[in-house]
């Protein structure tokens, strides 16, 4: 998983947020409080991209949370098989005002805190700490546990539903886990299986610490459901032979139910033909890749939102990492699609497309 490198002074992520977040004056006047959750992608270089609010409280607080995340220094990128990879990450920022003075008190009310409060005094649980909880054996052991214990619900398999469920819980002061809940849902059956497998986990945890003391800390784990044949490193069956008018679609990333009308790429004649023409026209072959005669197809999965915009592109398979950034840039530069529809309304779907790098064409 990616990790926060810290600012020039070596701050932890909790200390950095405490110094950087400023409580908006409008929010103080209106006594607005709550927990904003911000999702972003940690790129191959550690830069933060595709920043968006996944849990909103109020536009004033949302904007401050977005500002702080956008201003963050680069992170240490996530890695897979020793190589940097793009990783989606969700970070919560809690805004909390001090309680008003009790009636009859001679003490003047304290000025509202100007920083985000990482601690929830009512629940006694930290959101950010100097030392986050750790799973013994790390995320590699967690992935091995999921591989051995996760059971794909049969109905979800039949309906070709897949996606990532996020399960949140509290890691206690002795490493015990409690108060499990799903904070990002995909489908009721997948949500239930994700909850079951996380609750059944017996891998020991090392508790988080604040000021050298073990404390209760909120923690979130992803549980990814992938249909057979769509795992990274495999050629997705839907991509192997796309139809002349329809790009490869994988349903269920953020949809609770299958879509009933796929997205359409604009252009004349439209569909996959227009996509291929756009790629051929706009692709900029990386100089080093050209020098090394690198060619092949980069398969990229992305979310097409309800406005037809490309979001969160991730490389699934590539002949060489030198081609990945250009494939991602190319997809991000695409004009808006006509979005998928469900029951007559625009909806989000997951799309997988190959970007072909060929020195004979470029």
Image (tube, grey):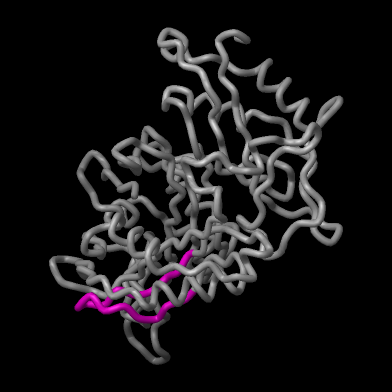
Majority SS type along the magenta span? strand
Location of residue 237 with respect to 208 vertically, above or below? above
Residue 152 coordinates in the image, percent (x, y): 53, 67
Q: Depth check: 166 or 121 in front?
A: 166
Number of numbered discs visible in the structure rendering: 0
What residue is at 20 percent from the left and 67 percent from the top?
209
At x 52%, y 63%, the residue is 27
Q: Which corner quadrant of the image does residue 331 belong to? A: top right
From the viewer's side, name the closer residue of 121 and 26.
Answer: 121
Q: Is residue 180 magenta?
A: yes
Q: Is residue 127 above or below residue 44?
A: below
Along the line of sight, which residue is nearer the eye, 297 or 255? 297
Q: Give me the residue at 20% from left, 68% from top.
A: 206
Residue 83 placement: quadrant? top left
Q: Tell me if 240 is positioned left or right of 230 in this view.
A: right
Give above or below for 350 relative to 334.
below
Q: Is residue 117 visible?
A: no
Name the side, left or right, on which 134 lies relative to 257: left
Q: Is residue 317 magenta?
A: no
Q: What stretch of residues is rendered in magenta?
A: 166-181
Percent position of residue 78, x then y: 35, 43
Question: How far from the left and from the top, in percent, is residue 12?
Answer: 25, 52
Please give left or right for residue 282 compared with residue 109 in the image.
right
Residue 87 visible? yes
Which residue is at 39% across, 83% downward? 101
Name the image quarter holding the C terminus. Answer: top right
Indicate the position of residue 244 as horizontal and vertical percent values: 79, 32
Residue lying at the far left in this picture: please name it. 212
């Amino acid at each position: 998983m990616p990790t926060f490198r810290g600012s020039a002074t070596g701050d932890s992520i909790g200390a950095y947020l405490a110094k950087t977040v400023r409580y908006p004056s409008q929010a103080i006047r209106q006594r607005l409080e709550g927990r904003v959750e911000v999702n972003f992608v940690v790129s191959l270089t550690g830069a933060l991209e595709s920043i968006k609010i996944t849990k909103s409280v109020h536009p004033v607080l949302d904007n401050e949370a977005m500002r702080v995340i956008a201003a963050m220094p680069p992170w240490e990128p996530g890695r897979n098989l020793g190589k940097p990879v793009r990783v989606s990450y969700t970070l919560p920022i809690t805004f909390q005002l001090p309680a008003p003075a009790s009636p009859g008190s001679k003490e003047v009310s304290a000025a509202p805190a100007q920083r985000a409060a990482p601690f929830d005094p009512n629940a006694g649980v930290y959101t950010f700490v100097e030392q986050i909880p750790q799973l013994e054996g790390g995320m590699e052991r967690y992935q091995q546990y999921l591989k051995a214990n996760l059971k794909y619900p049969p109905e979800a398999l039949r309906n070709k539903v897949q996606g990532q469920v996020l399960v949140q819980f509290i890691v206690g002061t002795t490493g015990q886990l409690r108060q499990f809940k799903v904070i990002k849902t995909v489908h009721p059956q997948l949500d239930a299986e994700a909850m079951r497998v996380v609750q059944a986990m017996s891998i020991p945890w090392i508790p988080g610490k604040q000021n050298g003391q073990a404390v209760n800390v909120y923690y979130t784990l992803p549980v990814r459901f992938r249909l057979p044949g769509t795992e990274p490193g495999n050629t997705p069956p839907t991509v192997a032979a796309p139809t002349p008018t329809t790009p490869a679609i994988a349903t269920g990333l953020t949809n609770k139910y299958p879509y009933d009308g796929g997205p359409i790429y604009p252009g004349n004649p439209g569909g996959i033909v227009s996509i291929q023409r756009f790629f051929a026209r706009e692709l900029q072959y990386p100089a080093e890749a050209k020098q090394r005669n690198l060619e092949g197809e980069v398969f990229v999965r992305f979310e097409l939102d309800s406005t037809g915009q490309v979001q969160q592109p991730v490389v699934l398979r590539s002949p060489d990492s030198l081609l990945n950034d250009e494939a991602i840039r190319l997809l991000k530069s695409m004009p808006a699609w006509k979005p998928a529809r469900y029951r007559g309304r625009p909806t989000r779907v997951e799309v997988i497309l190959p970007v072909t790098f060929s020195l004979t064409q470029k």
